[in-house]
Amino acid sequence: MILSAGQGSRLLPLTQSQPKCLLPVNGRTILEWQLAALAANGVNDVTVVTGFYAETVDALIASRDFGAQTVRTLYNPFYAVADNAGSCYVAREFMTGDFMVINGDTLFEPELCRRALAQHDTPVTVTIDRKDSYDGDDMKVCLDGDRLARIGKSLPLDVVDAESIGMLMFSEEGGAHFKDAIVNLLRSEGGLKRWYLQAIDALAVKKIVGTASIEGLAWQEVDFMDDLKSAEALGEKWGG
């Protein structure tokens, strides 16, 4: 499940008439980099949740041959009024068996995906990385051993151990808990403006959320122009 419904307004004017996932990075769109990395790890059933300029994502997917990989789009009609918890709600019917949820603006290489999948041994697994310092835009994580204790952008820096890279893995049991948590989140006050990771924070108290560390491997969240430059550098390193 790739969440690609948003516009990415912080990258205007590049996202004036296309979603962030279609921004080119060294000859491929961010979405194509993601699909290639997933295919290299045998992830061959992919749902891309769309919203802003959804037809441009539809057109890209229709124009490509993904081989053994099945790629479909699912339109989120609430993308303009709800945050990404709304996309997860719309996509609940595809959350069956073992599945992944990936942010549509996270560029990663196949080896990162492989390492994360190899560590998925809890009902819910959040992929994390560590660095020397964290800022207000990082999705920060507090750990209890390898278990996730808290996740959120506003966590106090003195309790932060790592950051989420925007790649989560679920077992069937974990998926059932997640879907219930998404419904509860959207029913809460201000629910339409909530991030789906706030549902993961709520699940952490159940002690079913583990972590997968990908320290030492390269990835890039693309939110700002400087991020796009860093993504280009990675794309050149990996090859188009």
Image: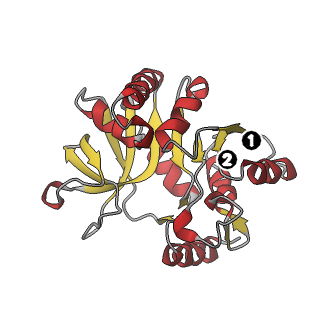
- Residue 223's spot in the image, x, y percent? 49, 66
Q: Which mark is residue 237?
A: none
Amino acid type at circle 1 is Gln
Q: Label 2 near label 1: C-beta < 8 Å? A: yes
Q: Is residue 145 toward the left or the right of residue 200 in the image?
A: left
Is the image coloured rainbow, by chain, by secondary structure, or in one colour? secondary structure
Query: Where 206 falls versus 36 (above or below)?
Result: above
Residue at 27% from the left image edge and 51% from the top image edge:
141
Which residue bears the numbered disc 1?
A: 69
Q: Which quarter of the rendered picture does the C terminus lie within?
A: bottom right
The mark that comes first in sequence, 1 or 2, is 2
Amino acid type at circle 2 is Ala
- Residue 182's spot in the image, x, y percent? 42, 29
Q: Which mark is residue 39?
A: 2
- Residue 34's spot in the image, x, y percent? 62, 54
Q: Dot 1: few (<14), some (14–19), or many (≥20) neighbours within 10 Å?
A: some
Q: How far apart are marks 1 and 2 (CA)?
A: 7 Å
Query: Where 57 falls versus 234 (above or below)?
Result: above
The outermost residue toward the left is 158
Q: Nearer the viewer, residue 83 or 217?
A: 83
Q: Is residue 5 toward the left or the right of residue 178 in the image?
A: right
Query: Where 121 falls versus 109 (above or below)?
Result: above
- Residue 127's spot in the image, x, y percent? 40, 48
